[in-house]
Image (cartoon, helix red, strand yellow):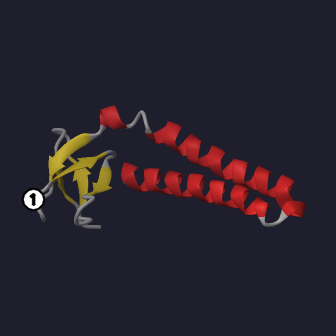
Amino acid sequence: MNVDKWRNWALVMMFGGFFVMYSGVYHRAWIPYLMVIGGLGVLAGILVYFRFGPVNPTVHEAECPRCGRVTRLTGAYDACRHCRQPMRRVPGGGYEPYVK
């Protein structure tokens, strides 16, 4: 999965956690539970950001064979973030199109 997808999920978790916590304003009896659940969502988002933040220096850039745009690829198998063309790393360090 692309780093951008993980970061998007982290952002969704953080905003979802804040939304759950703020919804306690309308449900005063549930405030302690909503604060804990929302806090766990925010914490999960932070942990995902900490996990995929250090990946950035190791990201390789390659030109996509389908759309011709430069994309950042992280693993041995990854996809172009513009056109979703699957690619795999070859022993020389570059990437080539990959068909499952």
User: Is residue 34 shown left or right of residue 69?
Assistant: right
Q: Residue at x 39, y 37 (%)?
A: 55
Amino acid type of the residue tagged 1 in the rendering: Gly
Local SS, label 1: loop
Q: Position of residue 78 (x, y in %)?
A: 31, 54
Q: In which quadrant will I find the N terminus?
A: bottom left
Q: Residue at x 45, y 55 (%)?
A: 8
Residue 16 sits in quarter = bottom right
Seen in the picture, residue 23 relative to 18 is either above or below; the reply is below
User: Is residue 39 shown left or right of residue 3?
Assistant: right
Q: Position of residue 82 (x, y in %)?
A: 23, 62
Q: In which quadrant will I find the C terminus?
A: bottom left
Q: Position of residue 91 (x, y in %)?
A: 20, 41
Q: Position of residue 97 (x, y in %)?
A: 18, 60
Q: Residue at x 27, y 48 (%)?
A: 73
Which one is nearer the viewer's eye here, 18 or 68? 18
